[in-house]
Amino acid sequence: MAKIISGKEVSAAVREQIRKECDELKAKGIAPGLAVIIVGDDPASRVYVNNKKKACADVGFVSEEYALGADTTQEELLGLIRELNNKKEINGILCQLPLPAHLDEKAVINAISPLKDVDAFHPSNVGGIMIGDYNFLPCTPAGVMEMLHSENIDITGKNCVVIGRSNIVGKPMAMLMLHENATVTICHSRTQDLKGICSKADVLVAAVGRPKFVTADMVKEGAVVLDVGINRDENGKLCGDVDFESVEPKASYITPVPGGVGPMTIAMLMKNTLKAAKIQNDIR
Ligand code: NAD
């Protein structure tokens, strides 16, 4: 039977620490501020934005929401980002993705000042992560690493397999594991013998976006299984990329969905916003 790593518990501890540091900043007259931009009315994006605003209130940050209509033009959106880049009270800016199809996501990401890019999506921050010289870590992969740290799981020399190669999760996930001296394999939709590769993993990260994709026959006895996926199953119930029922008895540690990586991602966003506030106020 696996030990369940609760994202709820680990993220609560991270948030507690952020709350303390936020109070210290406030005592110096600095109130960390996050601006969240949402364009259109995608229901999933609305849930994520509400959760981020709640998390800000919970740790004591100021949050500003900019809810723009689905017909917002590229120029209007870039104009808002320029304004927020210059706004002193705002330390972090995030634009909830995906954007409506007529908007250019790449241009939007590039427009956010790297010093306020708390999602760590800007190419200069992505490059920094590649060479191990960064201010902000990408929130979801950083959340996964924090879960490993919370259990003192040392991945040095271990076989770590990441399923998924997205810019947001898979690729940076692999890089963070490499920074901690793991031997990392990235699998994707064209990988041959996925089952064979996964079943050799000491640590398996699933970031595929397919409900219950990872089954027990893909998992080594005693593996650490980290589930990034957020999907709906055939009954509309929230589930991960891992078939929890069948995998849990084989794993040594496993993360649940919901209550796993999701809350960690938001906690890491708060951590990045705190860091942004410190950097912008010359506090190290
Ligand atoms: P994505 O669609 O951009 O990437 C999915 C990846 O899975 C791709 O690289 C693709 O090559 C790979 N893939 C698809 N089918 C495959 C197959 N049959 N075999 C092997 N690989 C396959 O998705 P993403 O943005 O990386 O997100 C992945 C999942 O994580 C989604 O469920 C998403 O909702 C979730 N997510 C969760 C959080 C969180 O906070 N927990 C954050 C971001 C994304």
Image (tube, rainbow, N blue to C red):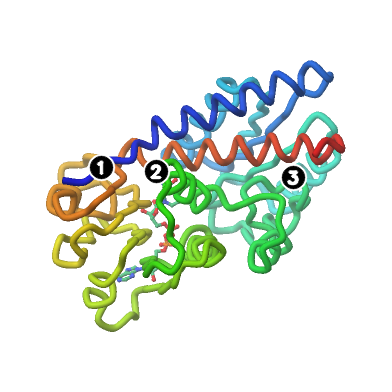
Q: Which mark is residue 3?
A: 1
Q: Is mark 2 within 8 Å of ligand 1?
A: no
Q: Residue at x 71, y 51 (%)?
A: 135
Considering every residue shown, the one lying at the far top of the view is: 27
Which residue matches tag 2?
A: 151
Looking at the picture, how far across and down is residue 58, in whole percent?
55, 20
Dot 2, crowdedness within 10 Å: few (<14), some or many (≥20)?
few
So how many labels did they put on this image? Answer: 3
Q: Nearer the viewer, mark 2 or mark 3?
A: 2
Earlier residue among tags 1 and 3: 1
Quadrant of ligand 1: it is: bottom left
Picture quarter containing residue 81? top right
Q: Nearer the viewer, mark 1 or mark 3?
A: 1
| Amino acid type assigned to the residue bearing label 2 in the image | Glu
Earlier residue among tags 2 and 3: 3
Say which quadrant the C terminus sits in: top right
Q: Residue at x 76, y 53 (%)?
A: 114
Considering every residue shown, the one lying at the far bottom of the view is: 192
- The CA span between labels 2 and 1 is 10 Å
- The CA span between labels 2 and 3 is 31 Å
Q: Is mark 1 within 8 Å of ligand 1?
A: no
Which residue matches tag 3?
A: 116
Q: Residue at x 24, y 51 (%)?
A: 252
Q: Nearer the viewer, residue 232 or 131?
A: 131
Picture quarter containing residue 280? top right
- The CA span between labels 1 and 3 is 37 Å
Dot 3, crowdedness within 10 Å: few (<14), some or many (≥20)?
many
| Amino acid type assigned to the residue bearing label 1 in the image | Lys
Looking at the picture, how far across and down is residue 212, in whole percent?
21, 55
- SS class, disc 3: helix
